[in-house]
Image (cartoon, grey):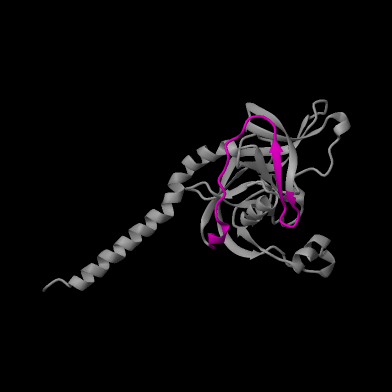
Amino acid sequence: MKPNNNFDAWRALALGAVLLFALGTTAGAQNLPDTIEKIKPAIVGIGTFQRTRRPPSIFRGTGFAIGDGLHIVTNAHVFPEKVDSERKEIVAVFAGKANAIEIREATKVAESRDHDIAVLKITGRPLTAMVLGDSSRVREGETFAITGFPIGMVLGLNAVTHRAMIAAVTPIVIPQLSGQNLERKVLTRLASPYNVFQLDATAYPGNSGSPLYHPESGQVVGIINKVFIQETKESVLQKPSGISYAIPIIHLQDLLKKSRLE
């Protein structure tokens, strides 16, 4: 019996496609350790510092360096509404590792409350900067990474990385079971909604401001801005929902253009 050349050809193509798919799905995982090592110096803690206070440092969220290494991106809600300047309290960026923390004074230079984004400028030498990517090309089902401080400085200033699949590209407004639960900011978003990335990652409140980035290139495509809480904020550590949200990076890019910080 003669071999079926057509069948053999199709089988070879099918095996090749499976191999390419397997390589494609593992490439990001293989390169992620190198990417983490490269971007970790750009990840910082955000909070306040007052030398005479106990504890002197209060952690509020995560941020990451961009551009010239002196500008830090975080969530607008991470930036404190008030600081006690009379007692020399400052907004602080905590850079470095747990055994060698640098405290940099920071000032806010741009903000978008609608998109929960703030850009800070720090003192001192430049940090390693992350590169901004193209959030319009992000697709549901793709896997990215998050690096930040999920429970603040409880375990020291040691950044933690989680994988995060894009579970959905969905409007920012989360439906409420009752009209009584609608806050003013939610009503504002109802008037002008925009899409965010819903992730299947287990993130925590301390992750606010963390970069969502490509595991191979390290390019940032989003900013973690909230975690879906099932019960109370106190129970989030014991019962994480595994659902979190990220603001597409295009809104930061628009803010940088508007503020002439590009």
User: Would residue 189 be counted in the magenta stretch?
Assistant: no
The quarter of the displayed image where residue 109 is located:
top right
Residue at image coords 48%, 47%: 217
Residue 42 position by quadrant? top right
Is most of the magenta stretch helix, strand or loop? loop
Give the residue at the far front of this rendering. 260
Of 19 and 214, nearer the camera is: 214
Whether residue 59 is visible to the viewer of this picture, yes or no, is: no
- Can residue 254 be seen from the camera position used here? yes
Residue 94: image quadrant is top right
Horizontal and vertical percent position of residue 133:
55, 52
Residue 12: % across, % down? 25, 64
Q: Quadrant of the N terminus?
A: bottom left
Query: For the view shown, which residue lies furthest in the right direction?
Result: 86
Q: How many marks?
A: 0
Q: Is residue 133 above or below residue 109?
A: below
Residue lying farthest left? 1
Is 14 drawn above or below residue 157 in the view shown?
A: below
The stretch drawn in magenta includes residue 119: yes
- Residue 242 percent coordinates (x, y): 63, 55
> Against 7, is 63 above or below?
above
Residues in magenta?
111-140
Q: Is residue 84 left or right of residue 251?
A: right
Q: Nearer the viewer, residue 66 or 184?
A: 66
- In the image, is 28 to the left or to the right of 190? left
Q: Is residue 204 left or right of residue 128?
A: right
In the image: residue 170, left or right of residue 11: right
Which residue is located at x 79 percent, y 64 percent? Answer: 188
Position of residue 72 measured from the top left corner of the image (x, y, whole percent): 66, 41
